[in-house]
Every structure is written in structure tokens, then in C-alpha cells.
Amino acid sequence: MKYICSLITVSDIKRSRDFYENLLNQKVKYDFGENITFHGDFAIHLQSHFKELIDNKEIKHGGNNFELYFEYDNVEQIVKLLKDNNVSFVHEIREQPWRQKVVRFYDPDENIIEIGESIEYLAFRLKNEGLSIEQIARTTNMPIAFVNESIEKYNR
């Protein structure tokens, strides 16, 4: 068995495609009309069509029990873009216990989207904030070799 992608249902395929493609800068991999797959391997499926495929069982949105996760190192820039586009937030920027900056918000169908800085960038940021390699490794639960490689990646 091979995992292929996550799929979320959406009430308006055009509106959702616009949200993911133009606001979150995702690139369409396949467009099958009622189903659109993006590079990164997640898909949106028109709810009315998908409902037929599951014998007209109820589809609920806004359950806060699932999220799509993306990484972008300038989380502050994303928050400004989201605010400029009147996106509804679950919460604005916060640091997770391992110090990673993240923001969570809703797509047009109340699916949770999380954007966090990459763990590699986190190591680099913490080093620039004055933490030692050992402190970064302890804080992030990452191996020292990974921390060193991550910092080196951003120092190039």
C-alpha cells in the first residue's frame, strides 16, 4: 500500500482553488474539475460531488480535528498577507514549546491551516538569538548533527 495524499472537501472549488493557489502560492498538479491536486500532494474535492461518492453521508466542516501543515520561514509576512485578505485565525503567531513559530487559520470551509517556520530555520534563528548548539538541540529535541547542518544551510 502507498499513501498518496490528503483530501479535504470544499463547498466552492473555484473559491478554494483561488485561496490555495493565489493566497498560499500552491501550484496545481492536476485539475479534474471536481477534484484538484496540488504539488505537495494534498487535494480539494467539491463537497457536493464527494458526498455522492460516500452514499450521501453528512459532511461536517469546522470540527478543528484536522489541519493541513505548510512551512514558510517568514511567518510574520504570511500573517500580514492573511490579515490583508480578511482570513479568520485560529490563533496568530505563537511559539510552540520547542520554540517553532506557527500560525493557524481557517480556509474558506473552516479547515485548519497551519504555517510554521521550518525546524532547520528554527535552529538558525535560535543560534542568532544566542543559544548554544547544545541548548538548541535540547530545546528542539533535534540531534546536534541536525542542528549544525541546519545552521550551516542558512549561513550559505
Image (spheres, rainbow, N blue to C red):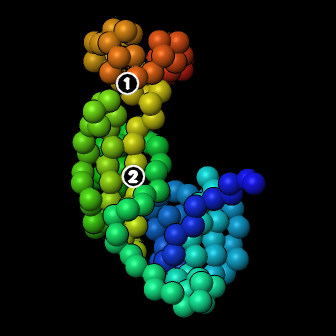
Q: Which residue is rendered at x = 63% and y = 85% of the image?
A: 53
Q: Quadrant of the N terminus?
A: bottom right
Q: Amino acid at mark 1?
A: Thr
Which label's residue is closer to the chain start, 2 or 1?
A: 2
Compute the Cα span from label 2 to label 1: 19 Å
Residue identifier under label 1: 140
Q: Which of the labelled discs sits on residue 151, or is there none?
A: none
Residue 10 drawn at (x, y percent): 49, 77
Describe the element under mark 1 as helix, strand or loop.
helix
The outermost residue toward the right is: 1
Q: Nearer the viewer, residue 57 or 114?
A: 57
**Residue at x 37%, y 9% (from the top left corner):** 134
Quarter where residue 136 is shown: top left
Horizontal arrangement in the rendering, residue 14 relative to residue 64 (left or right)? right
Q: Amino acid at mark 2?
A: Glu
Residue 19 visible in rendering: yes
Residue at 34% of width from left, 69% of height from top? 63
| Residue 83 percent coordinates (x, y) | 27, 60
Q: Residues within 10 Å of mark 2 (few under 14, many from 20)?
A: some
> What SS does tag 2 mark?
strand
Q: Which residue is at a point 29% across and 37% down the rendered structure image?
A: 96
Q: Nearer the viewer, mark 2 or mark 1?
A: 1
* Residue 143: x %, y % from top left: 48, 16
Residue 48 can be seen in this image: no
Mark 2 sits on what residue?
114
Q: Position of residue 126 (x, y in %)?
A: 33, 20
Judge the density around disc 1: few (<14), some (14-19), many (≥20) Cα neighbours within 10 Å: some
Relative to the observer, which residue lies in front, 156 or 122?
122
Work out which quarter of the rendered image holds the C terminus and state it.
top right
Answer whether labels 2 and 1 touch (C-beta < 8 Å).
no
